[in-house]
Image (cartoon, rainbow, N blue to C red):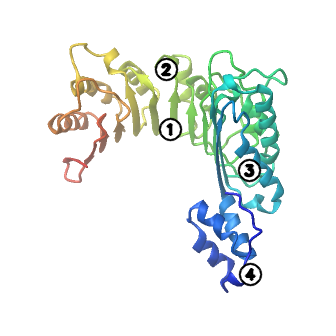
Amino acid sequence: MFSSTSTLHPTADLSLPNETLAAIFDGLPPSVLADITRVSRRFNAVAERILYSFISITDLLSPSAPIPTKTLRCCQSILRRPHLVEAIKRLQIRWQGDFRALSPQKLAAACTEAGAAIQSLLFLEGLDIFLGPANLAIVPSPPIHAIERMVQGCQFPSLRYCSFSAEWTKGVQPYTSILPDFLTLVPSLRQLKISDHHTALVLAPYALPALSYFRGSPDTAASLLPGRPVEHLALIGQDSDVNRENLPKMALTSVALRSLDLSAMQVRPILLRNITGYFPEIQNLKVRLALRHTLHYALSGITLLAGLSSVLSEFPHLVCFDLSPTEILGGEATFTEEAALCTAWGQVCPLNRIVFPSGTNWQLTGEGNWTRD
């Protein structure tokens, strides 16, 4: 991605405006753009801005590669090119590996070094950080989350999308006050994903005024959603994590919740029934049902889904029901079985799209008939 510009050919320049060159280069693969940067200084100036607009790095950590070399080289490259800071809109960093073979001190130092470059990205609009095993290692001091080492002190006034995650197990270093401090400084944020935060997140009431989508644990959602315009919610963890304490708080958004994604947890139908009382305006529901643990043991396959009609009848605005994450025992449904369920469910709520565990997509036509794609 970050190519040398030593081999330049001034005569290769075209007499075209930079805007035209940018339109021509936009959409080309990074490898091609890297070659273009070597053609001439002018081509380099245009192609380089496109290359740096979306930076995606993946490091595979191992005993032979104990530090995230690609990440550090990229960050050093960013610091050497301050003229490109305005062009960098999206940054994605992913680390993977076995923490038992890694050095906690080296990983902590790498997080801090990367953070120095990330702080300079004042025009960033999208930030996606997954640090894999980095937070599993015990670092003596200071006791902060690995991601917080990267984003401490950062201010991104234009950030609209943010995703933080690392491998998690009980007893690992939790997030500290650095995370809420960071979230207070991203007023334009609309989408937030935090996969390894499992407790309440205490924020100032004025923080995240534009948040419309959140993905995280039920307890974190319960502390984050009240008073904010969140229309789309995705929950992670166990369905037992959703309880009578946090569910009512999740319903205190400043606008009605329209979309609920429960595909990251095994959901028993009783939870769906509990949800209807708090989110009556839901239009889109995606679920990974735990059917074999909840319905009659003698039933199998698609027959298990027939009992959902009474639950769906309590969603008066539901138009899309996605069951594709659900695992069904006993084989896939036949065309006739799926069609019958579409008809039955369509009679109890205003569905116009259903996706079955098989992945088949059914649509309600203008004539009132269900058709399968």
Mark 4 nearby-residue class (10 Å; few <14, some 14–19, many ≥20)? few
Closer to the chain start, of discs 2 and 4, is 4
Q: Nearer the viewer, mark 4 or mark 3?
A: 4
- Position of residue 72 measured from the top left corner of the image (x, y, whole percent): 76, 44
Q: Amino acid at mark 4?
A: Pro
The residue lying at 70 percent from left, 46 percent from top is 70
Q: Tell me how far mark 4 sits from mark 3, CA to CA.
A: 27 Å
Q: Nearer the viewer, mark 2 or mark 1?
A: 2
For residue 135, what is the image quadrant? top right
Q: Tell me how far mark 3 sits from mark 2, CA to CA.
A: 37 Å
Residue 284 or residue 119, whichever sits in front:
119
- Give above or below for 243 relative to 175: above
Report the residue marked by disc 2.
Answer: 238
Q: Tell me how far mark 1 sits from mark 4, CA to CA.
A: 58 Å
- Position of residue 358 measured from the top left corner of the image (x, y, whole percent): 29, 36
Disc marking residue 10: 4
Q: Tell me how far mark 2 sits from mark 4, CA to CA.
A: 61 Å
How many marks overall? 4
- Position of residue 183 measured from the top left corner of the image (x, y, whole percent): 72, 38
Q: Tell me how far mark 3 sits from mark 1, CA to CA.
A: 42 Å
Q: Nearer the viewer, mark 3 or mark 1?
A: 3
Quick one: SS at disc 4?
helix
Report the residue marked by disc 1.
Answer: 256
Q: Amino acid at mark 3?
A: Cys
